[in-house]
Amino acid sequence: MDSIIQQFAIKGEAAEIKPLKIGHINDSFIVENNDAKGDSYFLQKINHHIFRDVEGLQRNIQLVTDHLREKLLQAKETDIDRKVLRLVPTKNNKLFYKDEAGDYWRMYINIHGTKSYDIVNEELSQKAGKAFGNFQLLLSDISHDELIETIPDFHNMEFRLRQFREAVDNNAAGRVESCRKLIEEIELRAEEMCLPQRLFREGKLVKRINHCDTKVNNLLFNETDEPICIVDLDTVMPGFVLSDFGDFMRSAANNGKEDDTELANVWFRMDIFKAYTIGYLSLAKGFLTPLETEMLPFGAKLITYMQLVRFLGDYINGDTYYKTEYPEHNLQRSKSQFTLLQDIERKHSQMELFIAELAK
Ligand code: GN1
Ligand code: MG
């Protein structure tokens, strides 16, 4: 590991390297600085089986962070180094390092004095809504063809269903029989969930630059619980705003965990939904179309459904995509997402009513 760190243009000397248990895809480490006053670093081994164009991925991140930094400078913000991620280049001035084993590495300056939450209260949720709304606003003037789709068709539901059906047909791990019921539930909703793709083709729904992984813990808060920085920029790409709204709901408004083994814990929190929506719309109402606003609750449903499809598809494939901690982990995740989905369906019209009132 030392030889990898040596490749990057860090200031000072690296001390302890601590592996972090975050994320289902990449491997992350904190690299402490020998000088306690110096920066510490956030090192990641990029999963290049998933992010196949690492060069393009890193270019995207550089572009997005440069753009955000420029916007904050223009707005005369202070403390900008804690508000935008900063990549540390290699000593040869590249944005990643490929080691002899063929693994890809990248490094950021670790932002000090921040925390993230897996569970939020209403106040934090409202602040998060503003922060993610502002993120979309700040990135709204990047032209779409400047960014590559780091994972092609990432949030395209039609594509995700094709992939899922292929997994079911192949039955590579012989698990299909054991999850027939969930497969049926997925198929029952398949057509409904492809609505955004159809609306897009009809020219009714637009794409904007989205984060595409707005899990609650991808927003860092500062010491006084103000949002300070949005992290995990691997999937910033054009998509429907429903994605970012929906993924926050899926993660933060779930009373239970994404992989909860106690399904009674899993239900949709309207208080978190309401607070986030108020925060988000206070920023986004200036650019959202009436259709986008109206469809936000659909976003919560869609992204929870999509995650169910992705987790169950991975279970059926024999756990080739997400990291798992035990053999049935992806199945447990699928059950939790399905339980949440059902509660979102129950509360869907309440959500629509709330948004209609707000948008008045
Ligand atoms: C993955 O690795 P992580 O936790 O940041 C996934 C997201 C899923 C999420 C589910 C590139 O994100 O799309 O929503 O797991 N990222 C990728 O928790 O597939
Ligand atoms: Mg992520």
Image (cartoon, rainbow, N blue to C red):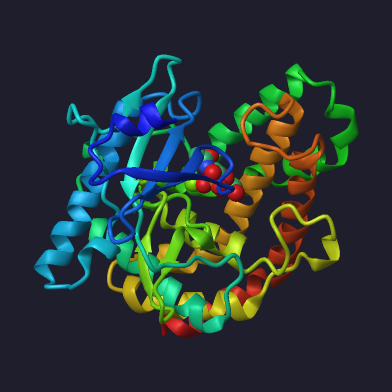
Query: With 195 as the anchor, is 228 left or right in this view?
Result: left
The quadrant in which the C terminus is found is bottom left
Residue under the point 85% across and 36% down: 179
Give the quarter of the image for residue 87. top left
284 versus 158 height, above or below: below
Observer able to see residue 226: yes
140 versus 202 height, above or below: below
Query: With 146 as the anchor, is 52 left or right in this view?
Result: right
Query: With 4 as the anchor, is 287 left or right in this view?
Result: left
Where does residue 139 sit, x and y in percent of width and height? Answer: 25, 56
Where does residue 268 sit, x and y in percent of width and height? Answer: 69, 69
Residue under the point 52% across and 63% down: 216
Give the camera-side residue of 181 and 106. Answer: 106
Give the camera-side residue of 353 and 78. Answer: 78
The quadrant in which the N terminus is found is top left
If the picture is divided into quarters, which one holds ligand 1? top right
Q: How many labels does the image show?
A: 0
Observer able to see residue 194: no
Where does residue 295 sit, x and y in percent of width and height? Answer: 50, 63
Give the quarter of the image for residue 258. bottom right
Toward the right, the furthest residue is 178
Give the camera-side residue of 36 and 186. Answer: 36
Where does residue 260 sit, x and y in percent of width and height? Answer: 77, 57
Query: With 18 as the anchor, is 360 left or right in this view?
Result: left
Give the camera-side residue of 360 and 281. Answer: 281
